[in-house]
Amino acid sequence: MTDKDPTVLLAAVERLRSSADALGLPLELDGAEESRTARRELVQQLDDYVLPRLRSLEAPLLAVVGGSTGAGKSTLVNSLVGAHVSRTGVIRPTTRASVLVHHEEDTRWFTDKRVLPELARVAGDGAEDDPTSVRLVPSDALPVGLALLDAPDIDSVVRSNRSLATQLLSAADLWLFVTTAARYGDAVPWELLRTAAERGTSVAIVLNRVPPEALEQVRLHLASMLRDQGLGKSPIFTILEVDLEDGRIPQAGVQRLSGWLDSLASDARARSMVIRRTLTGTLGSLAARSEHLVTAGREQTAARDALLSAPRTAYREALAGVDDGVQDGSLLRGEVLARWQELVGTGEFLRSVEAGVGRFRDRVSAFFTGKEVTSDPLGDALQTGAAALITSHGQVAASTAARAWKQAPGGPPLMAEHPELSKASPDFADRVDRLIRDWQGEVLELVREEAGARRSTARFLAFGVNGLGVLLMIVVFSATAAIPTGAEVAVAGGSAVLAQRLLEAVFGDQAVRSMSVKARTALLARVQKLYDDERARYEQVLEEVSVSDSAVGDLEAAASSVEAAR
């Protein structure tokens, strides 16, 4: 803590709390679970301790009694209070709910949600087995200005108990860390003690159940370990191994500890030093803890961007494939070519067109009046071919995007949860058919608009709107520019060249070019919309599980503001 404006610091911490809470880390990346735990613990400590303490520096000192299973925490609390306020026993875990003992005059500080806002307040014995509650026990045995909170075991076999113990210790002004002569070297307590040292938390060690003959040796070893961890100034209170009286340690065994706690409560300056030391240390830890979360957030956004890129690339390539397939003449083979030749004949008709308009008119009239012929089969063949092209590329895009997700960080769990993304939507084929039909309708409208006053001419009437529309589709499915003779004619039997010349005979060269460009552009626009809708399935999944760039930036800025204000 510094002499800077406390209201500025409070506002900065409130902003940090909001930013950290808003930072989701949903993608399953390496280390993501640890980062989520760190984020949850940061938000909890801000809610449970930092913000309440900043708002009420004069509130009672909260000492949390924590330690390993069987260390005698509840027995110690009962002994300090001189009454059975916290359940003890040999069956583990014993302490399931939190027990907060305070002087009657301090009740107002704990009945509301000032500290530990997530935990419900209850009185009496009804909440002993409810880990979501804190049981308030007023006692005149404690001095005004001091409260004791009995926490669950830090190494409990029950995960929720371990989590609650960590949360409660993070809410403390002072840790009363209870261990025994037999277990003071256990790994789990020292992990928490190292955290306390890093954050500048005020810690007092209670070495319980010490055999008298081992007192000096154990105490010296423990003091050495504390110095190595940066806790050399932490007081050590030893309690000898004695017979309990009515389930409590005899008063003489806890007299030194009890007197020390009384002096803290009665000395406003000493109490303030403990409170400010812990608060200052916790505030000083926020920058590094926030930076860890910022890094985790950036990893999430990088993974999200990679996941977004995969379907975008896949469907962009699919659209390019359709574009190529529309222009390269491949749709003018097979069934389309057969239906085309049924409609206009073979090379003889081509030669008649090349011979001149007069023979062209005669051939067309004879063809359409001499027998009943329709362009519908050709239109159907074109629809089938185009639908197959669009469907095939769409299905490949789906499988390509899914394969990329299965190989990308954070992607496998999403694919496991959404296996439907590995293929096109169930109604994809139907939507493609509808797309082609709608586009064909658009092509016919182009023909009608371009025909204008030509609708009564013999050349227009010879083919009609449907026939001319099919001819325009033939041109679109070959190229948008003038179609050369030579190799392409040989491949498609001259169908594209013939279709273009027939259209030019009705509309003119420039009009045909313009219509073919418009028709092709309209088709690709429809395909792009279809593929965009398919790609949106992946983006929708990511929207539900992704972190925003602004959330990461907000957290980084909030952490900087705390540093500047403290």
Image (tube, rainbow, N blue to C red):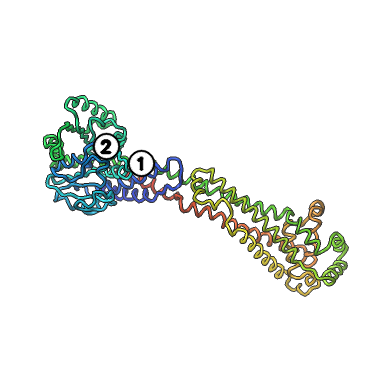
The label number, if any, that marks residue 76 in the structure image: none
Indicate the secondary structure of the residue bearing disc 1.
helix
Closer to us: mark 1 or mark 2?
Answer: 2
Mark 1 closeness class: few <14, some 14–19, many ≥20 residues within 10 Å: some
x and y, in percent, of residue 395 in the image: 62, 52
Residue 61 visible in the displayed image: no
177 vs 425: above or below: above
Q: Residue furthest front?
A: 91
258 horizontally vs 65: left or right:
left
Given the image, on which type of amino acid does mark 2 rest? Ser
Residue type at mark 1 is Arg
| Picture quarter with the C terminus | top left
Q: What's the residue at 35%, 46% (across, down)?
A: 40
Please give left or right for residue 414 compared with residue 316 in the image: left
Classify mark 2: helix, strand or loop: loop
Along the line of sight, which residue is nearer the eye, 63 or 498? 63
Q: Nearer the N terminus, badge 1 or badge 2?
A: 2
Identify residue for label 2.
Answer: 68
- Image-based side of 207 in relation to 457, left or right: left
In the picture of the structure, the residue carrying the numbered disc 1 is 289
Q: Identify the image quadrant of residue 67.
A: top left
Residue 397 placed where, x, y %? 60, 51
| Neighbour tally class for label 2: few under 14, some 14-19, many 20 plus, Cα within 10 Å | many
Query: What is the CA distance from the residue labelled 1 to the residue labelled 2?
Result: 26 Å
Tell me where residue 246 appears, x and y as whole percent: 13, 40
